[in-house]
Amino acid sequence: MNWKKIAAFGLAAVMTAALVTGCGGQKAAQSGSGDKGKIIVGLDDNFPPMGFKDENNEIVGFDVDLAKEASKRLGREVEFKAIDWSSKEAELKSGRVNVLWNGLDITEKRKENMLFSDPYMDNRQIIFVKKGRTDIKDEQSLAGKAIGTQSASTAEEYLDKTDFYKKDVKEVKKYADFVSAFMDLENGRIDAVIGDEIVGRYYMSKHPDSIEAVDVAVGPVSTFGIAFAKDNQQLRDEVQKVLDEMKADGTMAKISEKWFGKDITKK
């Protein structure tokens, strides 16, 4: 074997080793299973109070605080990555994020493609209207009205499969986020918003003179959970363990009180 062949063989070996290492590194990033590996949290960064950007352009919120504390207890760095919420399952499956932690409802449909933590909070879908409006009192009074909701949300799933919203409602307008829907409601472009009670009431607290709630549940009451890739049972169990500890020692309750004024997490 001449020197050129030896050099070529050596280069091929190095490239092969690098390729194997690279694939292994990608797999580790996707699974998030290393003891000290970074946990990449996928979220909609315009979903207050669960996860959103504050006046300093920092991502904050109830779920953000939970994720920070859980990662701290696991001895792992956490990164918050804003994603297109309508593509959340693809982001998780591809490994671009390790978890979805952002007021995500647990549904049977989602369970087909994701692993979930135990539920940590109940969530109702309710109707929000412009302050002072009295003709909208329940679902049936939405007939002939223009309704707004967030794309890829639990509310959207319910509206899409319910005949009333296909036949009797004037329009179901879908937004990238609930904040945009509420802004259109304030400006009179739509008649009502159907969405998460927790998110809506937080928005109301910031706009007390323009938005109010119709305190009637729309569709079934759901629960929030943290989603993981189907093949990432290890990370799911690690996170669940520290969540249980946070619930038992009162940390989760304190974070809830910070954002909601009381403990509204599941006991």
Image: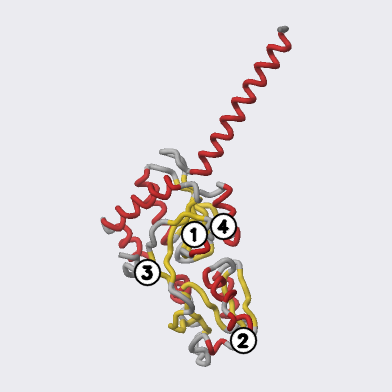
Q: Name the residue under label 4.
A: 88
**Callout 2, which amino acid?**
Asp
Within 10 Å of the Cα at label 1, are there few (<14), some (14-19), or many (20+) other Cα atoms? few
Q: Residue 168 carries which label?
A: 2
Q: Which residue is drawn at 51% across and 39% down?
A: 28
Within 10 Å of the Cα at label 2, are there few (<14), some (14-19), or many (20+) other Cα atoms? few
**Callout 1, which amino acid?**
Lys
Q: Where is residue 16 in the image (x, y as percent from the top left)?
A: 63, 25
Q: Where is residue 5 in the image (x, y as percent from the top left)?
A: 72, 12
Q: Name the residue under label 1.
A: 111
Q: Residue at x 41, y 43 (%)?
A: 76
Q: How far apart are marks 3 and 4 (CA)?
A: 26 Å
Foreground residue among 211 and 103 = 103
Q: Distance between the residues labelled 2 and 1?
A: 31 Å
Question: Which residue of the protein is positioned furthest toward the left in this rendering?
Answer: 249
Q: Which image quarter is the C terminus in? A: bottom left
Q: Which label's residue is closer to the chain start, 3 or 4?
A: 4
Q: Do the residues labelled 2 and 4 touch (CB within 8 Å)?
A: no
**Callout 4, which amino acid?**
Lys
Nearest-to-viewer mark from 2 and 1: 1
Q: Are marks 4 and 1 in contact (CB under 8 Å)?
A: no
Q: In this view, does 51 lie above or below 79?
A: below
Q: Distance between the residues labelled 4 and 1?
A: 13 Å
Image-based side of 198 in relation to 3, left or right = left
Q: Which mark is residue 223?
A: none
Dot 2 falls on a residue whose secondary structure is loop
